[in-house]
Structure formats: structure tokens, C-alpha cells
Amino acid sequence: MSTEDQIEDINALEQKFQARIDAEQKIEPKDWMPDAYRKNLIRQISQHAHSEVIGMQPEGNWITRAPSLRRKAVLLAKVQDEAGHGLYLYSATETLGISRAELIAALQDGSAKYASIFNYPTQTWGDVGAIGWLVDGAAICNQVSLQRTSYGPYARGMIRICKEESFHQRQGYQIMIELAHGTPEQKQMAQDSLNRFYWPSLMMFGPHDSESAHSARSMQWKIKRETNDDLRQKFIDQTVPQIEYLGLEHPDKDLKWNEERGHYDSGEIDWEEFQNVINGNGHCNRQRIQHHVKAHEEGAWVRDAQNAYDQKRRARKASTAA
Ligand code: FAQ
């Protein structure tokens, strides 16, 4: 086949692929897909997986210090759920032809990112409430729309994950309700956590659409179903009455209802801070990766045992088949 024929062939395949996407058909692992679609998915889903796993650290830091046995059990369950989300998402990424070991190596050498929010420290119990409420709240906003993403394994993973995230958000908001309606010191703790986690939560949605490198392609392929700015706006709007109910002050002093748009206008995010954090210079970036490397090394014996067991099982199967 000549090079021209090959190009024509690829063009035809790409058109057919886009037609399937436009018709809302899911793309499955064994289907033909453009290489750029595969690579973009590996990038996004694996970074999502890394976020879930690294995201265990800030809250995990409070498991031994939770204020009651009940709170401890709830937080433990939530943090374990995040590990599960990471596993679903790593499995979904592996269906695209990349190994878990390669994905982990990319996280540890810094070539793959994870959500910026997890590089902020959790200084008080109020931060655990703010994370559940705001961080899981922002994650749900985004993930509800990803339930309709075009790649089948990712979409199915998202449906399951969203159910669990809703519980996470409620447990965080409940902590905030108790603090905000508690003693003046507790209320102050809730306000302080809201002040520190509000802006970083808005950054979770990524840069403005005009600055977003991947959005146009991802929207065309329906990997993303809503843009960074549209999702951020949804989150801003839904958070206002929640802050009012808590009786706390809104951290955005420029926030104003815009009758014409039917949305809140808000102050500008500190994009310099965002760039610093995603480029590895946030408060906790180094600590988060060091901790991951240590835990991964300490878990080597589990992977070795699993591999040895698999080898034995395969050998046994081969000898009974012979
Ligand atoms: N942090 O062109 P775009 C959770 C990077 S799950 C770090 O707009 P895209 C649950 C971006 O990767 C939270 N990096 O990118 C939980 C790209 O860099 P690259 C995670 C960011 O992909 C709760 C560059 O900037 N959720 O929290 C961030 O089209 C509590 C240009 O950006 C997901 O991952 C950021 N915030 O849109 C767990 C959802 N924003 O890759 C534990 C799935 C942007 O070229 C405890 N992901 N970047 O090197 C997405 O929806 C998208 O990937 C976006 C970014 C919206 C995050």
C-alpha cells in the first residue's frame, strides 16, 4: 500500500471514529482509536488516578487525631474509598496499553501531574471538613460530567466513583456544620479552613478555557463534556448558599450575583500560585512524592508475593493441561 493510500485509510478511520463519538457511542478498549486520543486519555485518567492516591495523604494525616471514634471510622472509610478510586482508574488506564509500573514511574519522576489541591497541608480538623465539602464537592462537579465521557471503562468507573464521592462530600459538610455552629473557637476554625481551601478548590478545574492546552481536543472527542470554566462556575454557584447556611463569610470579596448571566461573578484566581504548585513548588509537593516512594518501596514484597503466586498458578495449570 502506498503512503498516500495509508493516509487516506487513516483519514477514513478517523472520520468513522468521530462519527461514533458524535453519535454518543462509547469507545471500548479493543476499538480502533487515533493515537492522540489514546495518549490524551492515558494522560488524563492516570493523572486522575494519581490524584486519588496522593489525595489520601492530607486526610490520612488526621486519622489518628480524629476527635472521636465515630469520626475516625468515617474518615478511615473515606480514605480507603479514595484508594479504591485510584485502583479503578489505574485499571481503566491499563486498558489503553500501558502498565501500572510505567504509570507509577511517571508519577514518581514528576512527568505526570496530580491535582494541585493535594499539595496544601491539613493544619486543623477543620481542614478535613473543608476537604470533604469543597475538594470532594469540586471533584463531584467534574466527575458527574465525566460519567458521559466517550471512553467506556472511564465512564463506567466514574458512575461508581460518583456514588461514593457524594458520601464524602456529606461527611465533610457535616464536620463544617458542627464546627460552624459550635463554640466561637470552632467557628473560627471552620472560617479559617474555608479561607485556605476555597481558592485552591477553584484551581482544581484547571486554567481558564482560553489557556487550556487540551480542552478543545478533549471536547471534540467528548473525553471532557464541559469546559473548565463552565464546571468552575457551577461549583462557585452551588457553594454560595452552602457558605450562607454555615453562617460563614465568603472568602471572595468580589463575589457578586449577575442577573443577566444568571450566575455569580467572582474575583480572579491567583494563577501564579497555581502554576507554582503544578510545577512542583507547592507547600507539600516534595513530601507527597517522597511518601509515595517510601510506601511503594515498602509494598514491594506484596507485589513480589503476587507475582510468585501467579507464576506458580500458571505452572500448575500448564502441567495439568499437559
Ligand atoms: N492540578 O489543558 P488543561 C479528587 C494541568 S479527584 C494539577 O486544562 P485538562 C477526589 C493539566 O494536567 C481530583 N494539574 O488540562 C479526591 C495539564 O498538564 P499536562 C482530580 C492541573 O486535562 C478528593 C495542564 O495543566 N480530578 O479530588 C490542574 O484538559 C479528596 C493544562 O490544563 C481529575 O483529575 C490541577 N488542578 O483539564 C481524592 C478529574 N488543572 O497534563 C482524595 C479528571 C490542570 O499537559 C481526597 N481530569 N492541570 O502536563 C480532568 O477533568 C482534567 O484533566 C482537568 C484539567 C479539568 C483537571
Image (spheres, rainbow, N blue to C red):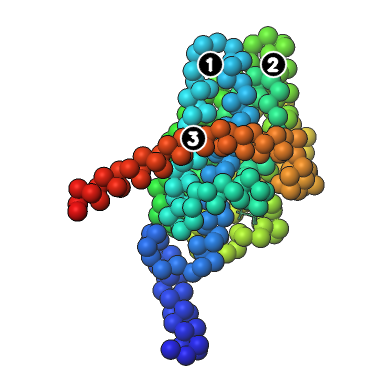
The picture places residue 234, in percent across and down from the top left corner, at: 59, 43
Q: Residues within 10 Å of mark 1 (few under 14, many from 20)?
A: some
Q: Crowding near pointer 2: few (<14 within 10 Å), some, many (20+)?
A: many
Tell me the amino acid under the disc marked 2: Lys
Question: Which residue is label 3 attached to?
Answer: 301
Q: Along the horizontal axis of the image, is 42 left or right of 108?
A: left
Q: Residue at x 71, y 23 (%)?
A: 123
Q: Secondary structure at mark 3?
A: helix
Q: Position of residue 12 (x, y in %)?
A: 43, 79
**Residue 37, position in %: x, y?**
51, 64
Point out residue 101 in the picture as x, y percentages from the top left corner.
52, 48
Residue 232 visible to the viewer: no
> Vertical placement of 26 versus 238: above or below?
below
Rendered residue at 74%/48% (across/down): 279
* Residue at 35% from the left image edge and 43% from the top image edge: 310
Please identify the quarter of the rendering in which residue 297 is found.
top right
Of circles 1 and 3, the one toward us is 3
Residue topped by disc 1: 71
Task: Of the two numbered discs 3 and 2 on the same chain, state the one appearing first in sequence.
Answer: 2
Q: Give the answer, above or below, for where 216 lies relative to 262.
A: below
Camera-side residue of 184 and 172: 172
